[in-house]
Image (spheres, rainbow, N blue to C red):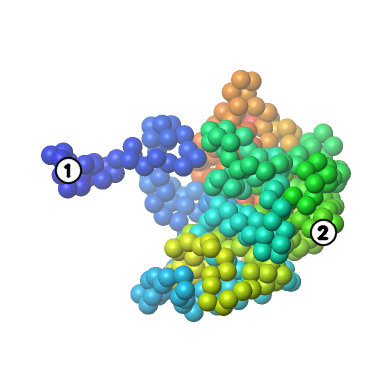
Amino acid sequence: MNETAPIRGGTAVPTNNLEAFWMPFSANRQFKEAPRMFVGAKDMHYTTADGRQVLDGTAGLWCVNAGHCRPKITEAIAKQAAELDYAPAFQMGHPKAFELASRLAALAPTGLDHVFFTNSGSESVETALKIALAYQRVKGEGSRFRLIGRERGYHGVNFGGISVGGIVGNRKMFGTLLTGVDHMRHTHDPVRNPNIDGEGEHGVELAEDLLRIATLHDPSTIAAVIVEPVAGSTGVLPPPKGYLKRLREICDQHGILLIFDEVITGYGRMGAPFAADHFGVTPDIIVSAKGLSNGVIPMGAVFVRDTIYEAFMQGPEHMIEFAHGYTYSGNPIASAAALATLDTYREEGLFERAKALTPVWSQAIQSLQGTRHVIDVRTTGLIGAIELEPIAGQPTKRAFAAFLKAYEKGLLIRTTGDIIALSPPLIISEDQIGEIVDTLRPILEALD
């Protein structure tokens, strides 16, 4: 653990100094006192530095939908790296980016036939917001500058994303953020919708918040509204029945673009290509990332309606239509990884598998109702949440204790506040679903 790099300034610099890496969304000091290191992975399991197997109950960070180190994906990456490692996306191209865009357009809901590539969910959100604003301007409605998000929404960590997002901890340190942003209420109502399995029975009227906000600001000033079909990072909040459909109706009524953030729900998590398919509501823009490339290579994709794309394709043909993009948009290796990921999903029927496993998953996770400290359980698709009663004056501590204990017992879970979130790879077996519940139950019972 004390290997050194070449001497710098007369001092040998440790190559594995834990202090050098400022870890994201982590309790850095706690981790560095007792590091939890993964050194390998295969299918449903991670291997720790001390040789233990840890069952992945979270698909990494909601992203490894096809399981770890899948041969088709790793082989595609190696082959592409040896053939064409990088090609610029500005005024140039390479075949795999176009092939991937075509494959994705065929997978998306009807009418969302154009794809803009990014490198993450945060960049996808930022791209979608900019497309929405620019679209309103190019079609002559530049007065539409407002963006509407939702309380408890998570839309990544860039300035646009945290502005329309509604998680206080992600916003409070960064000043005034974007102007012209408002927020609808969240849909979490554990009193009327306890232990949701699928969709909440009550709360469709909360969609009227968009109508209220539109009336307050004048609908002609609103460019777009962005929501997660299932709010994920805030603790898995499924929508009330009819809620997304009502948002679509209000947007249509007032000329507002509807954006679905499907960074978590896309690519099979709901037993369908997208949550838009699962809920039967088609937005104007879909934001995606994570499962697109199975988490192997950073990549995101933004899907837009034909009418949006065509609105930009005006004016002189030699002019850039949309002044936005990234150095790594449609990167060759990322494109190869994504194509191989789509092949793996199709060849192994993983979307269909997720749909078939959903009742088994729901029954297993919902069986944790009544376990000590559990105050609510929510399931939809292959996603689950177990909400714990907080320790008075010490929010998040109880769930974090469960996270540490689960890791010790060979299970990776994710916590957000005092909520345990679960989202396993789509290759999970029924026995492994049982293993997750059998591991968690005694841990929860033993918590202080």
Camera-side residue of 195 and 278: 278
Which of the two discs, 1 and 2, sits closer to the camera? 2
| View extreme (top): residue | 393
Q: Which amino acid does label 2 sit on?
A: Asp
Q: Mark 1 points at which residue?
A: 8
Q: Position of residue 293 (x, y in %)?
A: 53, 64
Q: Which residue is drawn at 55% across and 34% down?
A: 175
Q: Residue 28 in the image: x percent, y percent?
A: 42, 35
Residue at image position (38%, 35%) is 32
Q: Quadrant of the N terminus?
A: top left
Q: What element carries label 2?
A: helix
Of the image marks 1 and 2, the number of the one nearer the N terminus: 1
User: Looking at the picture, which amino acid does disc 1 mark?
Assistant: Arg
Q: Quadrant of residue 3?
A: top left
Q: Quadrant of the C terminus?
A: top right
Residue 424 shows in the view: no
Q: Label 2: which residue?
A: 252
